[in-house]
Image (cartoon, rainbow, N blue to C red):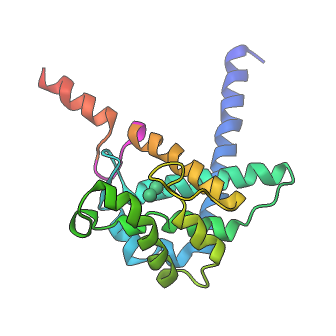
Amino acid sequence: MSRRSEQNSSSGIAHDRRATRNDRVMQDLERYGGEILHSGEMEKAFQQTHHNWSTVGEHTLRVAKASLAMCYLLHRLHIKTDIPDVVKASLCHDLGILGRYEKFSGNRECYRQHPIDSVVIARALANNLSDKSADIIERHMWPAAHSKHPNSLEGVIVSTADKYAAVKDFFQGSSIKHTGPKPFLHRILRRK
Ligand SMILES: [Fe+2]
Ligand SMILES: [Fe+2]
């Protein structure tokens, strides 16, 4: 086999693995968080800008996907995590930030209050929200915003995924609002 075809076949395998993992993620999100995923709140989440170039909805999916990827990896290492709790918490963690400019007086109040509001929304949306999921949501801002630290492995996973997704929000932007570094550079270059 030539070097080129070897490279093509290994990138094909990586692509297949990614597709399989994405399917598994979507199945878990539907199975354990379908009622949240298809709610009016989630619809609104895809309309509100978040982290400058993304939306709350796209950020939420990034957090859920990264959280589940960590769970799958830990399961392969025989470390058990509670996937239904991770799904519900990751999907709801930022829903309390919807309408932030109308309901919060500024960023400081928003950082402190939105996790608490997210718990209220999660209790209304999710079937049987566990205390563990509520704690994950309430503490997700850790280590920022003087938040209490996570009190479960699942809490550490979602808080870590949240920071990772915030970086991804910046570099990947929003495919709904067509914002991000790529469209931004495009606009700048077109002006010249
Ligand atoms: Fe948040
Ligand atoms: Fe977040």
Left or right of residue 121, residue 151 in this image: right
Residue 67 visible to an observer of this rendering: yes
Residue 160 drawn at (x, y percent): 59, 48
Residue sitting nearer the eye, 185 or 23: 185
**Residue 170 lies in what quarter of the image?**
top left
| Residue 168 is covered by the magenta coloring | no
Q: Overall secondary structure of the magenta stretch?
A: loop
Residue at the image point whose x is 54% and y is 61% from the top? 139
Residue at the image point whose x is 39% and y is 66% from the top? 113
Residue 169 drawn at (x, y percent): 42, 44
Left or right of residue 32, residue 113 in this image: left
**Dividing the image into 4 quarters, which one contains the C terminus?**
top left
Residue 152 drawn at (x, y percent): 70, 61
| Residue 172 is covered by the magenta coloring | yes
Residue at the image point whose x is 61% and y is 84% from the top? 128
Q: Magenta region: which residues?
A: 171-177
Above or below 163: residue 12: above
Residue sitting nearer the eye, 39 or 186: 39
Residue sitting nearer the eye, 29 or 50: 50
